Image (tube, rainbow, N blue to C red):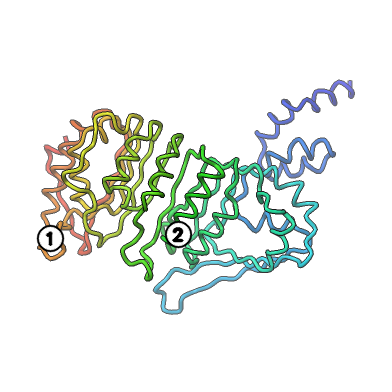
């Protein structure tokens, strides 16, 4: 009877089915039962890792220190930092056992991470990927991390298995950006290493040495055009410039398009822009954050962008005039016109997130007719 029970437990499909129903801490306990359990359950425990230092602590002799930084003036939010000090001659035996199990990694988890003495570690890997089976890479930090440093972290983990790369904007902390000068190299590395990428989200900043913000070169546009499998793309307002918008429109599988602007940004989209009826054949989700209301109006004059939408997120200041020197617009009028047009331009819409506001905290009114 015991032999029969043991044979059932050692069926990989059965053990994996049981493990997936258990909490992570229970799975860790299962890993201690036997070598067989360790190798069977381990991949389910280490599939998704919430912070980079957890992986680096697998290196024998690695030390981590946590700090909390607070702005005494309370201008900026407080944030945590983890400093990892790697040994000068790292033993990667344990790291090499666990690293292939990791498929999803969040680098920061709301903190900043500093790696000291990491050169020898990278040398021992011989140029190979740090996490050879990584499929999903995200960064979500409200900490004070430079945009060039952000790009270096991303470059460390781009490998042939990668399908998703996202720099997620933190809602409360400092935003995460990549430096405009690093974008061409980032895109080139993605094209050469993981050209079948499905999800791409990154936000070039308007750096002091690049005040106009990121303007993609023809070469960068050609790289974006080559991502024919792309399902999800989100970036800054250069996406709305005619040449880049045409590339997005011709990505046959693109289901989600996100554009993130800034409050004081001028309109980007040319009101005379051409949008073909064949563009955006699969687009179902549109997210526009801090996009100029004139750009939103221009998009709403082009049914191909809107007719298949099932989910829409809008965040804008409806009082923003096309020319900064002009008086503020009538926000109520813009809201009425926008909402009134929705049933006609997006008849299949099921989910709407609509956030409007100005610097004065104006309370906008919506007529009963539009509510109906």
- Residue 328 is tagged as 1
Image-based side of 121 in relation to 185, left or right? right
Asked whether 165 or 351 is in front, the reply is 165
Measured Cα–Cα span from mark 2 to mark 1? 32 Å
Asked whether 215 or 24 is in front, the reply is 215
Q: Quadrant of the N terminus?
A: top right
For image coordinates 44% across by 57% down, the residue present is 170
Classify mark 2: residues with Cα within 10 Å, few (<14), some (14-19) or many (20+): many
- Percent of width and height locating residue 13: 72, 26
- Percent of width and height locating residue 117: 69, 68
Image-based side of 225 in relation to 49, left or right? left
Between circles 2 and 1, the one closer to the viewer is: 2
| Mark earlier in primary sequence (2, 1) | 2
**Vertical arrangement, residue 198 with respect to residue 13, above or below:** below
Asked whether 359 or 251 is in front, the reply is 251
Residue at the front extreme, as displayed: 219
| Residue at the disc numbered 2 | 178
**Vertical arrangement, residue 290 with respect to residue 258, above or below:** below
Q: How many marks?
A: 2
Residue at the bottom extreme, as displayed: 72
For image coordinates 68% across by 50% down, the residue present is 128
Q: Label 1's element?
A: loop
- Residue 296 is tagged as none
Instruction: Report which quarter residue 173 is drawn in.
Output: bottom left
**Vertical arrangement, residue 150 with respect to residue 273, above or below:** below
Q: Label 2's element?
A: loop
Image-based side of 254 in relation to 41, left or right? left
């Amino acid at each position: 009877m015991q032999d029969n029970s043991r044979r059932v437990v050692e069926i990989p499909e059965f053990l994996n089915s049981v493990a997936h129903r258990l909490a992570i801490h229970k799975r860790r306990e299962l890993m201690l039962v036997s070598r067989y359990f360790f190798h069977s359950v381990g991949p389910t425990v280490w599939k998704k890792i919430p912070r980079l230092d957890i992986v680096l602590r697998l290196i024998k002799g690695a030390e981590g220190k946590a700090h909390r930084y607070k702005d005494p003036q309370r201008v900026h939010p407080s944030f945590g930092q983890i400093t990892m000090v790697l040994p000068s001659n790292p033993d990667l035996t344990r790291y090499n056992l666990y690293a292939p199990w990791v498929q999803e990694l969040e680098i920061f988890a709301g903190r900043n991470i500093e790696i000291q003495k990491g050169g020898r570690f990278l040398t021992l890997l011989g140029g190979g990927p740090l996490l050879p089976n990584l499929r999903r890479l995200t960064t979500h930090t409200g900490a004070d991390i430079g945009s060039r440093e952000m790009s270096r972290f991303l470059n460390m983990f781009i490998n042939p298995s990668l399908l998703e790369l996202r720099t997620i904007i933190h809602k409360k902390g400092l935003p995460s950006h990549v430096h405009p000068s690093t974008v061409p190299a980032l895109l080139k590395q993605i094209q050469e290493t993981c050209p079948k990428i499905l999800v791409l989200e990154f936000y070039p900043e308007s750096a002091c040495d690049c005040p106009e913000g990121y303007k993609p070169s023809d070469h960068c546009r050609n790289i974006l055009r080559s991502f024919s499998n792309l399902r999800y793309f989100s970036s800054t307002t250069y996406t709305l410039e005619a040449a880049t918008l045409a590339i997005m429109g011709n990505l046959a599988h693109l289901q989600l398009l996100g554009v993130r602007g800034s409050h004081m940004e001028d309109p980007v989209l040319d009101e005379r822009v051409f949008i073909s009826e064949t563009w955006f054949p699969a687009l179902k989700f549109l997210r526009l954050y801090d996009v100029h209301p004139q750009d939103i109006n221009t998009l709403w004059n082009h049914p191909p962008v809107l007719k298949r939408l099932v989910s829409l997120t809008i965040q804008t200041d409806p009082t923003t005039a096309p020319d900064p020197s002009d008086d503020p617009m009538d926000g109520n009028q813009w809201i009425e016109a926008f909402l009134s047009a929705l049933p006609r331009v997006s008849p299949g819409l099921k989910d709407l997130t609509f956030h409007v506001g100005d610097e004065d905290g104006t309370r906008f009114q919506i007529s009963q007719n539009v509510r109906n």
